[in-house]
Image: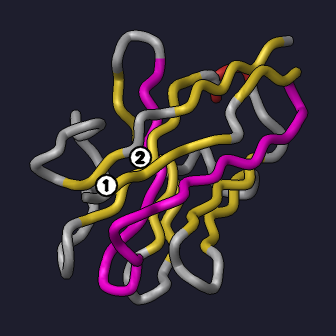
Amino acid sequence: EVQLVESGGGSVQAGGSLRLSCTASGITFNDRDMGWYRLIPGNECEMVSIVSSGGRTYYADSAKGRFTISQDNAKTTLYLQMNELKIEDTAAYYCAVSFPDQSLPFRGAVCQRRDLANWGQGTQVTVSS
């Protein structure tokens, strides 16, 4: 059974940093895309960052220069380092891992859609002024 468990969320003041982690069991990331999405108030789903199975990284414009996606050498843990956090980064953040040899979507109402990927349970990030 595939399980993804996120951690690292919390409350932080604007300008601060958090590092989210997503630990996988039941799979490794070798032939899969991995990514972070967020569900902002109003239930709008946004892709934050994706690292492809080939190692190429993608970021939402809002995340470029501030967030960094990475994985551990064992390819069982995915990270999202978030720096210079802004109030508008407040959201529930979800880890996603694609099905083998498939890609993660870049846009659309895809958060938590289990026909598209494996998902974690989410971790809340709240940024205050």
Residue 33 pos. (x, y %): 35, 71
| Callout 1 touching callout 2 (CB < 8 Å) | yes
State which quadrant residue 50 falls in.
Answer: bottom left
| Above/below status of 9 relative to 40 | below
Residue shown at 48%/81% (left/top)? 56
Which disc, if any, is residue 47? Answer: 2
Q: Amino acid at mark 2?
A: Met
Judge whether 121 appears above or below 76 on screen: above
What stretch of residues is rendered in magenta? Answer: 14-40
Where residue 12 sits: x, y (%)? Answer: 84, 24
Instruction: Give the residue number, with chain letter if any, for mark 1.
Output: 106
Residue nearer the viewer, 15 or 25:
25
Q: Residues within 10 Å of mark 1 (few under 14, many from 20)?
A: some
Residue drawn at (34%, 61%) of the image: 97
Q: Is residue 22 left or right of residue 31?
A: right
Q: Residue furthest left?
A: 115
Q: Secondary structure at mark 1?
A: loop
Q: Is residue 16 left or right of residue 120?
A: right
Q: Secondary structure at mark 2?
A: strand
